Amino acid sequence: MKIRKAVITAAGPEQRELPLQRLVDRDGAAKSALRLLLDEAAAAGIGEVALVVHPDDRQRYLAAAGDAPAPGSAAPRVTCLSQPAPRGYADALLQARAFVGDEPFLHLVGDHLFLPRGATRPAAELVAVAEREGAAVSAVQATREAHLREYGAVGGPRVPGKERLFAIDAVVEKPTPTEAEQKLFVPGLRAGHYLCFFGMHVLPAALFEPLAVALHAAADPRKVSLTEALATLPGRARWLALEVEATRFNLGEKYGLLIAQLALGLSGDDRDDVLAQVTELLLAREKGRASR
Amino acid sequence: MSRPVSPSVSQTASPTASRLVALLTATDDATRHRSLDGAVAGLAPAELLAECAALDAFRATTDNLYERVRALFFLQAIHRYHLAARADALPAGGRIPHDGQQLLLDRRFEEAIGRFRAALESEGPSEALCSALAAAYRGLAFQTLADQVRRSVRSVRGNQWMFRCGHPLDQPLQLRAELLQRDATGRFPLLRERTPVRMDLTHCGWSDIFFLGMDYPEGARVLNVSIDLGVHGRDAAPAPPVETFLRVIDAPVIRLTSVDLGATADLGELPLLFDFARDYLGLLKAALLAAGVVPPGIEGSGTSLRELLERLVGPGRGLELISHVRAIPKGSRLAVSTTLLGSLISLCMRATGQSRTLTGMLDEAERRTCAARAILGEWLGGSGGGWQDSGGLWPGIKLIEGVAAAPGDPEHGLSRGRLLPRHTLLGRERVPESARAKLARSLVLVHGGMAQNVGPILEMVTEKYLLRSDREWRARQETGAILEQLMAALASGDVKALADATTRNFFGPITTIIPQATNAFTERVIEQVRARFGARFQGFWMLGGMSGGGMGFIFEPERASDGGADGAGSGGGMSGARGGDPLAATKRELQAILSAAKRELEEALPFAMEPVVYDFAINECGTFADLVPIEAEAAALPSGYAPLRARAGGAAAAATASAAAAPAKSGGANAKSPSGTSAAGAAGAASLDELLAQLGFDRVEHEQIRADLVAGRIGLAQNRLSQHAVVRDVESGDVADLRGGAPADDVARGEAALRRGEVAIVTLAAGAGSRWSGGANVVKALFPFAKLGGRFRSFLDVHVAKSRRIARESGVALPHFVTTSTFTHAALERHLARTAEQDGSAAADADRDVPLRLSPGRAVGLRLIPMERDLRFAWEETRHQRLDVQAQKVRESLHAALIGWARAAGEGSDYRDNLPLQCLHPVGHFYELPNLLKNGALAALLRERPHLSTLLLHNIDTLGADADAGLLGRHLRHVAEGGALTFEVIARQLEDRGGGLARVDGRLRLVEGLALPREEQELELRWYNSMTTWIDVDALLACFGLTRAQLLAAAPDDATVAAAVRRVAAQLPTYVTLKDVKKRWGHGQEDVFPVTQFEKLWSDLTALPNLACRFVAVPRVRGQQLKDPAQLDPWLRDGSAAAITARCAF
């Protein structure tokens, strides 16, 4: 199994601007957040990327995608797909059905940035695992239960002999801790922690069918989540969770962009410079306090 | 006397050689379920001790929880019932090490056992040590079980996270968006939950309590029905009895209101939510915690409620929670409080997204989570029932069964069963509509008016199950068969068969397993219903738990056409249903029977309220929620809500600022009784003054006592003898040990005196018996406490029956004085009159063998609000048995609230806020015998029986006391040697608290426990005062400075006699004591307050220099007093009841 395509969704009314924001990458070059996502996909060996965007945003996105790729990164071919009406995340993903065809594909959410803790990029690892295992794989991260309300979460046993890999047998969108405790069992995880989605999946094309069914049945399509369709996978297809060694940054959160920028700055070539400026800022504040 | 056992107890059987260890570890049911009594029958004390050593070694090493617990109960029972009760086989004497007792009180049971076993090793076995070991093993057994249940409750999936959540930022819950959307008027929506209560068709012998259900899941089965209720004649139609409401408010507080308890408070600080006994809102707080709204793990974190609410509801906002039980009284046996807790938890779960939908029914998984949390909430609140109590969350009729723990369950490997049972809904295919309709048309549910504490009974049932006591175990097997019969009767709609089964169940297994499931009231009502309705009365149905509360009576419907027609629906029996109520007239008559029986017995049994007859309907929804439309809000909220909040007024806002302010201003502890009762209090005050005037209350003396109390000249601490007093145990020769019986010459002397008619009995029955009744206003002498000789007998019945036998044997009547007081006189007088009437005789002394005479005493004291220092002395400086962790927290919270109450009500001021008689107190049993002199009763008898020379005085609850010829003969020997009084003492066991026989500064005398300079001295005293006293009439008169001639010449209330009494009284100390008094209000609600009173005590006569006292040791069965209802079951089991019954001629 070879993963060649990726889908990035960025059509949500609240998220449209986020991938277009410019940040300074670890190499010191200013790029759009979208470019960083494309670099992530490229590093995973993806050759074609579909961006699902608002019909009015096509040009701006294509322009942002045109930023120079990271050194050594091959630029994937980018296709812009329009979501005709703001019918929610699931509907946005469904727009890529034709683009994907019957191949498995990498899916990234457009309002997140991902930063590896080591040398391996998370998307690259995810795709490698999916190809090796011949299965759908969702990137997950152990998350404290206080944050369960923000994510979809999965449960299941570890895959024997495979590090950080789990066979998913249950998935719940934004569970309460009560539900999580009752439905999402993950052996070996710290108490009070659950495997929550990281915003990155390798999904089978077969997922579009249940997604379409869920959308068709829903009174309000905006309320249909990807999780609903994912919940049909256990038992039908092999679906794994990979606990990635990386950090995700939700650009849509309060200070999300700032924190993402700081993280990039502090892990890149300009780390010392950024650190010095941050320290100066802190000192200035302390001095101000002292003089008061 | 049997041979005493060897003092060496180290000759131990190894666990492998022990027959009891083999029994515990047996895999075949026939051996495993063998009773302890059967297994140890015929073993000599030394063999029993060897088995104990083996069991002790086994229980310390086994990994299996229930083997360990059962071994502990075996050890308890062997020490209590097979060793301590066979005192004739143990050497005399024996002391309980004080440090061991302290460990016991601190719940350090394992260490206490070590200490007591070491003493057993070094000093040899004794009655005292065996009683202490029994208590320690029992304590450890229940602690082990409780710890396991607590662990299971916390480890139920869905509950665990709440204990990890230690900071507001950890709070993962958020209020549902629907509840945060204001309407056009700016108000937030009101979410309402309505929950039926549950009734139990099977009365499962409490097989659903956790200790049983988790060890014997296959035996834990109940048929449980969710029902709506209405009070017959008051409510238009049955409705879910429990209603709860939740909404967002614009203040960062949690506002709690219990409409039926009349309490409301705005809580602005986290610690207040963990303070359960502070006010009447403990249940609402427990629900908030158990639902995770305020996660239990956040207790003591030092964080703020405002922060938590901000995360949960948003900045500046809070939550309001309202509870309402639609006037269903306490003790209904319908699990109202658990239902209320479940309803509140469900409401909170819905509001925080922990249920699939905000409104409507819950799904099965949600109901199970809610039920698990109700168990958690009960544990947090320091209480706990069985798992079927939350049955009202489920719809309709269901079978609830224990489930074996399987791999993956938190209980697996620890207990045989799971904490939570399985619920199987019995739909129309299993219980057809016609059967439901017939049941509804035939059954009348009632509340008899009594509410009792079931705690000690739950423990008794657990203990007997684990011991596999023969009768109870066989009965438990029968309940399974009856459940099957009930299921079959329901399936076929055969109400008569159903009624037969419930009746057989009640008179068979239920009352065998739980004797307290019946009482004189219940049986009288059944008898009268049977007599009145004949064949139309088809059967009785005990609704669960203890007697006198919820019960069911099954009748043939009044009109034949209503008898079996289908299609009327499961609410066919309720008023307002099609064709009217087919049992309306029956219900009216039943109400009359219940009320009449209550009137007859209310002076003997503690009724909390007037009996109630219900209308009911099966509820097919279970708990159900809806959003109340704004226009319907006023009508939906309980009518008491608005006035309650209006009264709280602006105080609520102020209360949020400070924890200290909350109780005083918003229905907290300082306002313990809901408003409305203060008016009753005022009305009561007027009649109290009238009563005081009528009784010749000595106001001057009262004011002097108050001044002394307030100034600290008297008080609990001042009751004690001087710290310099030297208190030692008795010396050899101080006590004549007659435990094995008196010699033949004493017996002959006594028998001769009885034949000459020289003896009369004085039964002390003036006291309030507050420990027995928990402070209720009943006459203990008349309390029908146990079924003996085939009928319920009162304490007085038993005493009279013993005297009747003696009188018949001696051929001479044995007169009885029953001393009375303002509290007991009228009731006893009515009782005697009623007895005479029933016996067909006009005279009060109907029984010629035992002529009864009342000796009225009129002196009363007026109770006072206690001083804070006395409360603190009693609760903080005096050692008490610590409770289980959560229950101890609740107790400490209650103590703090009661101290607050005392301060607010005015320390040392008159206690007036209760029924007049509950504000008065008897002035101590010393006065009861002098009253015989003052009121002329003794003189009257002396005129009739000039030979009368001896009185036997005993407490009403010393059930074994009688005019035993041997002891009488020994007393007469003492008198011949110059003695005046002969006191009976018994060998001390652990439960015998309250002083004992001592040498105080060298003088032999009885010392009250409250007078001992140091608490630990009590255990050094081997002999405990039974209060039973043989009195030489002339010597006693001489002590009072009177002669027989003077007494015979004196008229009642003679000044000379009164002065003589006053003179002796002045030589005796006055003790300040705290007593519990019950205050009843609302629908069966009761509060217990500690109040201060004053007493002079009989045993202090032994300190008078001019009164020669002697002391004899008697068997425990003769000297034991039944002070507490928890003592009743051991008394019935250890052979005491049988021995005393054998001495009765009923």
Image: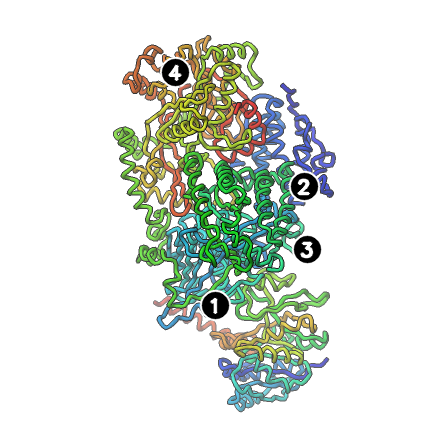
Pointer 2 or 4: first along the chain:
2
Say which amino acid is labelled 2. Thr
Residues at marks 2 and 3, CA–CA distance in whole angstroms = 23 Å
- Residue, disc 3: B407
Give the secondary structure at mark 2.
helix
Give the spatial CA distance, label 1 vs label 4.
81 Å
Residue B666 horizontal/vertical position (percent): 35, 53
* Amino acid under disc 4: Leu
Classify B47 as above or below A267. above
Return the mark for residue B941.
Answer: 4
Q: Nearer the viewer, residue B994 or B676?
A: B676
Mark 1 packing: few (<14 Cα in 10 Å), some, or many (20+)? some
Helix, strand or loop at disc 1? loop
**Label 1, label 2: how many angstroms apart (C-alpha)?**
51 Å
Q: Nearer the viewer, mark 1 or mark 2?
A: 1
Foreground residue among B829 and A103: B829
Q: Residue at x 37, y 52 (%)?
A: B262
The disc label shown at residue B61, or none: 2
Q: Which comes before the other along the chain, label 3 or label 1?
A: 1
The kind of residue on which mark 1 rests is Arg
Residue farthest bottom in this picture: A59
| Residue at x 29%, y 18% (from the top left corner) | B1054
